[in-house]
Every structure is written in structure tokens, then in C-alpha cells.
Image (cartoon, rainbow, N blue to C red):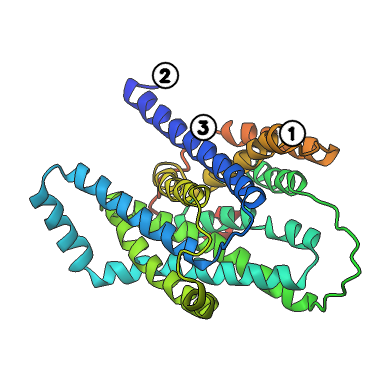
Amino acid sequence: MASPRENVSLLFKLYCLIVMTLVAAAYTIALRYTRTSDKELYFSTTAVCITEVIKLLLSVGILAKETGSLGRFKTSLRENVLGSPKELMKLSVPSLVYAVQNNMAFLALSNLDAAVYQVTYQLKIPCTALCTVLMLNRTLSKLQWVSVFMLCGGVTLVQWKPAQATKVVVEQNPLLGFGAIAIAVLCSGFAGVYFEKVLKSSDTSLWVRNIQMYLSGIVVTLVGVYLSDGDEIKEKGFFYGYTYSVWFVIFLASVGGLYTSVVVKYTDNIMKGFSAAAAIVLSTVASVMLFGLQITLTFALGTFLVCVSIYLYGLPRQDTTSIHEGDTASKERVSGV
């Protein structure tokens, strides 16, 4: 029988997962509303950069509250941020990898049919599970592996949209597209699990880690702003096209990013993937009521698979949220199946 402390811990994890799911769903809905209501919208790399800045400011505020006094807050920043260049470099890795992932995903989408891209990109779910096994010395049961691949199929069906014929002939390079999607999938799995390992391998505050990562993230996104939209920003301004609804979307993305780090810290990246899948289903259901989206048979089947996969993954009682010591052979860990 679980102790009161274990029950509180379980309730907190459940709370984090539910909030992350709801925020992610709200973000998707708000983004769709913004794109359909604003006549002229300038969503560029600037929005990503601003999101990183807001996440940094929120993390600084939470850390200040956590430390309890201005003196301890300054000491924490001086020791863990300003005085730890190695730690900053360590947390710059996921930021750089995520930047590569985003660029590879865009390159893949440009060279593959939308349906093919949609199916292959969902391989990031089992890739994350594989990285979790190999990098964090964990094992997954047969049932958990089945649920991971079931989730992969369910998300694919939920997002499935048959390709429409077009008179515009787009020159594509499928080989380049599949190569790019493979890199994007590997980057997604590696970056998420790497960040989880950093979080759980020391007693450093989650908010200190967030500050370290968001500082490097701002640098990376500023480079992206300059390379992608530099000329357009010089002509129209950094905040061109920003409305109240755009700022609301950015705020939701920022809050969602913070809750994602909490979920990774106290559960794991696989659970984060299940939460993201549930958010996709919720946002699509909400879109039916708000935007008149039509429910299809593939969506209904995909929703069923997502729900069943979440249930199946939650059945095993083994702990998959902490890093276990030991040097078990990779082959034995993977063959937990």
C-alpha cells in the first residue's frame, strides 16, 4: 500500500501531466485561432526567441521565490550560472540539437509528401523510448514497448490528412527528405533524454538548469533570427505583425515549456510524449466545436489507439522516472521486450 508521501508525489506528477496537456492543447487552439483571425501575421524566428526570453524571465522569478532571499538568489546565480561556464556549455547541447532538429524537419517537409512526413516523423516517439533505455540505463516491459508503438500509430492517424492533388509541381528529393527526417527523429530523442539525464544526475535546482538552457537557447535563436529573417526584420521591425492574440500564444508556449521541464524532471520523456499525444487529441476535439473541423474515421481510430496506449503504459508498476545505476549491457536493456 502506498504511503501518504508516495500518494502526494503521484498526485503531483499527475497534476503536472494534466496541466502540461491542457496548456499544450490551449496553445494549439490559440495558434489556430490566431492564424485564422489575423489578416497579416508575422510568425517568424522572432516568436521563438521571445518565447525563450519569457521562459528565462519566469525561471528567474521562480528561482528567486525558491531561494527565499535576495542574497541566496544572487549567490545561486553567481555560482551556478555566471561562475559555471562548463554547466552553461553542457546545457547548450540540447538547444543546439533542437535547432538542428527544427531545420531538418523543415528540410524533410520540403522534400517529402505531407502524409509521408507525418508518418515518418512520429518515429520520434519510439526513438525517445530507445534513447531512454540506452542513455538512462532503464528497461521497458513488453507492454510498455507495445504501448509506445501503439501511441506512434495513434498520433499518426489523429493527424492524418489525405494529400490533395495540386497543379503546382514541386521538385522534391525523397532521399534528402528521408535523411533529414532521420536526423530530426534522432535529434528529438537525444535532446529530450539528454536534458532529462542532466536534470536527474545532480541536485541542482530545476530552475537553475532552466536558466542555463534558456540562456543558450536565446543565443541560438538570435542566430536563427539573423540568418532567417534578418533583412525582413530590418525592413519591418522585430515585432511586426504582433497582436494581443499572438502574445497570448507566445505566453502559452512559454508556460508550456516550463511545465514540460517539470514533467521531464519528475516523470520522464516517454510520459511527456504521451501527454503531448493527449494534447493533440484534446485540441482536435476542441477544434470540432470552435472551428467546425470534421471528425473522420481515422481520427476516431487514432484517438482510440492513443487512449489505449496511455492506459497500457500506465499498467506496469516499475519505476521509470529515475536514473538507475549499473552498467547493464545495451542489448539486454533493449531486449526488455
Disc 3, SS = loop
- How many residues crowd around disc 2 within 10 Å: few (fewer than 14), some, or many (20 or more)? few
Label number found at residue 317: 3
Q: Are marks 3 and 1 in contact (CB under 8 Å)?
A: no
What's the residue at 49%, 74% (across, down)?
Answer: 233
Q: Position of residue 177 (x, y in %)?
A: 73, 73
Q: Position of residue 235 (x, y in %)?
A: 51, 77
Q: Which residue is mark 2?
A: 1
Q: Is residue 113 above or below residue 137?
A: below
Q: Nearer the viewer, residue 332 or 189?
A: 189
- How many residues crowd around disc 1 within 10 Å: few (fewer than 14), some, or many (20 or more)? some
Q: Is residue 172 above or below residue 32?
A: below
Q: CA distance from mark 3 to mark 1?
A: 23 Å
Disc 2, SS = loop
Residue 180 sits in which quadrant? bottom right
Q: Is residue 69 above or below residue 225?
A: above
How many numbered dots are placed on residues in this image?
3
Query: Amino acid type of disc 1?
Result: Phe
What's the residue at 42%, 60% (across, down)?
Answer: 50
Mark 3 / mark 1, whichever is N-terminal = 1
Residue 263 sits in which quadrant? top left
Q: Are marks 2 and 3 in contact (CB under 8 Å)?
A: no
Disc 1, SS = helix
Q: Position of residue 242 (x, y in %)?
A: 50, 57
Q: Which residue is mark 1?
A: 304
Query: Amino acid type of disc 3?
Result: Arg
Query: Does the image show residue 77?
Result: yes
Mark 1 / mark 2, whichever is N-terminal = 2
Query: Does the image show residue 337?
Result: no
Q: Nearer the viewer, residue 295 or 192?
A: 295
Nearest to the eye among marks 3 and 1: give it: 1
Q: Are marks 1 and 2 in contact (CB under 8 Å)?
A: no
